[in-house]
Image (tube, rainbow, N blue to C red):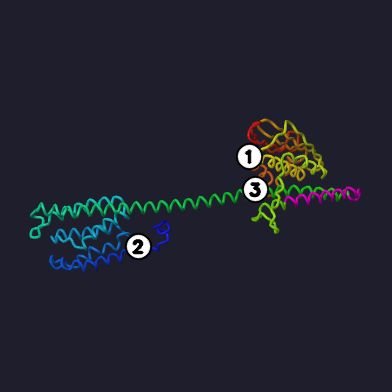
Amino acid sequence: MTPDALATRPRWYVPVADAVLAAAYFVVSLMIDTSIFAFFGISPLVALAMCAPLAARRTYPVLSVMGVYLVGLFVVIQGYQAIGFFSTSVLVALYSVTAYGPRWASRTALGTGILGCFLLSWSVDISEPFTAFDPRGSAVVLLMTVPLVLVAWAGGKLRASRVESLRAREDRFTRLAVEREQELKLAAQAERARIAREMHDIVAHSLTVMVAQADGGRYAGAAEPAAATHALETIAETGRAALADMRRLLGVLRDDDADSDGEHRALAPQPASGDLYALVEQVRASGLRVSLVRMGTPRTLPPGVGLTAHRICQEALTNVMKHAGPDPTVTVLVQWTDTSLTLEVSDDGRGASADTDDGGGHGLLGMRERAMMLGGTLTVGPRPGGGFRVRAQLPLPAPGGTS
C-alpha cells in the first residue's frame, strides 16, 4: 500500500469491508463450529454477538474490542469453555485495536486478553467451572492461548507502525509539494520584479529623452530649424536604441533559443559601469548639462555590479530630466575604493520639492531593490542648498580577490 492509497481509498470502503469480514466470520463459524454448538449447548446467537462487533473494528476499534471481549467473558463465565472458530474473533479484535486504536486501548486490550486466558484456564473442568482446578489442563490452555494473544498484539503493533509510516510519508510528500509550489511562486515573483525593473529602466529613460527633445525642438523649430532637425535625429536614435534594448530583453524571455532558421541568436552584452560615459553623452545630447567625474582606479567588477550601477545612474538621470525643472546642472560622480563602488548623481534643480515618483512607485523602488540585492545601500533626498541627490554604495571584493 502506498501513501496515495490511503488518500484515494473511498470513505465507504473500510466499513463495508469490515462488515463483509464480520459476516464471513459468522458464516464460517456456523459451518465449522456446528459440533461445538451441539455439544456445549451454545446458541449460534452467541457466535453472532461475538462476530458482529468486527464490523466496526477499524472505524470504532475501542468499541469493537469491548463488544467482543464482553461476549467472550460471558462465554467463559457460563462455563462453555469452548475454543471454536468464533472465539478467534477475540484475536482479530485485539489486532484491530492495536493497529488502529489509541495506545492506551492497545495496552488495556493486551492485559485484558491475557487475563481472559487465565480465566479460561481456571474453568477447564466442564462439570464444575471455577470450583475445581486442573493444573495440567490449565497449563495446556495457557500454552495455547497466551502465545496467540501475544502474536495478535505484535501483528497489530507492526500494522500500526506501517500505517504511521505511510501517513508520515504522505505528510512529507504534501509538505514537499507545498514547499515546491512556494519556491516556484517566489522564483516567479523575483523574475517578474527583475523584468519590471529592466522594462522600466529601458522605457522610462528613453521616453524621457524623447519627450525632452520633442519639447525643445518644438520651441526652437520656429527660430532655428537646424535645432528642430537635431532634436528629431536624437529622438530617432533614442527610439531605435530603446527598440533594440526591448527586442533583446524580449528575446531573452522567449521559450525557444533559436530563430526560425534554427540558428542561435547572439545575446548582446548587458550595459556595465564602463558604459556610463555613453549614457552621459546621450543625456547631454538631449540638452541637459551633465558632467561625469571619476575618482579612484577602475577595475573589473563582479557580475551584476556594473549593470546595477548603470541602471541606477540611468534612472537617476531620468528623474532629473522629469523633475529638476528647466536647465539644471547635473554631476555624476563615480568613486572607486578598495571595498566599494560609490555612484552619486546630484543636481541643483527643484527636484527636492517636486514629486520624484514616476507615478507607479517603480523608479526609486527599483533602484533600491537593485542596490539591496548586491548588499549595497541607496540614499535619496534633497541636497543642502537646493537640488536633489541619489547616492548608491555597492560593496566590492578586495583587490586581487575573486571578482
Q: How crowded is mark 2: few (under 14 residues within 10 Å), some or many (20 or more)?
A: some
Helix, strand or loop under label 3? helix
Magenta stretch in the rendered image: 221-245
Mark identifier at residue 57: none
Helix, strand or loop under label 2? helix
Residue beneath the point at 42% across and 61% down: 8
Q: What residue type is labelled 2?
A: Val
Mark identifier at residue 14: 2
7 or 289, nearer to the observer: 7
Q: Residues within 10 Å of mark 3 (few under 14, many from 20)?
A: some
Residue 257 included in the magenta stretch of the image: no
Q: In which quarter of the image is residue 54?
A: bottom left
**Which x, y percent locates residue 348?**
77, 37
Report the side of 255 relative to 119 (left or right): right
187 or 367, nearer to the observer: 187
Mark 2 or mark 3: whose residue is earlier in sequence: 2
Instruction: Kindly identify which residue carries mark 1.
Output: 374
Residue 231 included in the magenta stretch of the image: yes
**Which x, y percent locates residue 99?**
31, 54
Q: In which quarter of the image is residue 27?
A: bottom left
Instruction: Kindly identify which residue carries mark 3.
Output: 194
Mark 2 or mark 1: whose residue is earlier in sequence: 2
Helix, strand or loop under label 1? loop
Q: Is residue 58 visible to us here? A: yes
Report the side of 156 relative to 233 (left or right): left
Q: What residue type is labelled 3?
A: Arg
Residue beneath the point at 25% across and 51% down: 108
Q: Which amino acid does label 1 sit on?
A: Leu
Q: Residues within 10 Å of mark 1 (few under 14, many from 20)?
A: some
In the picture, the quarter occupied by the C terminus is top right
CB-based contact (under 8 Å), mark 3 and mark 1: no
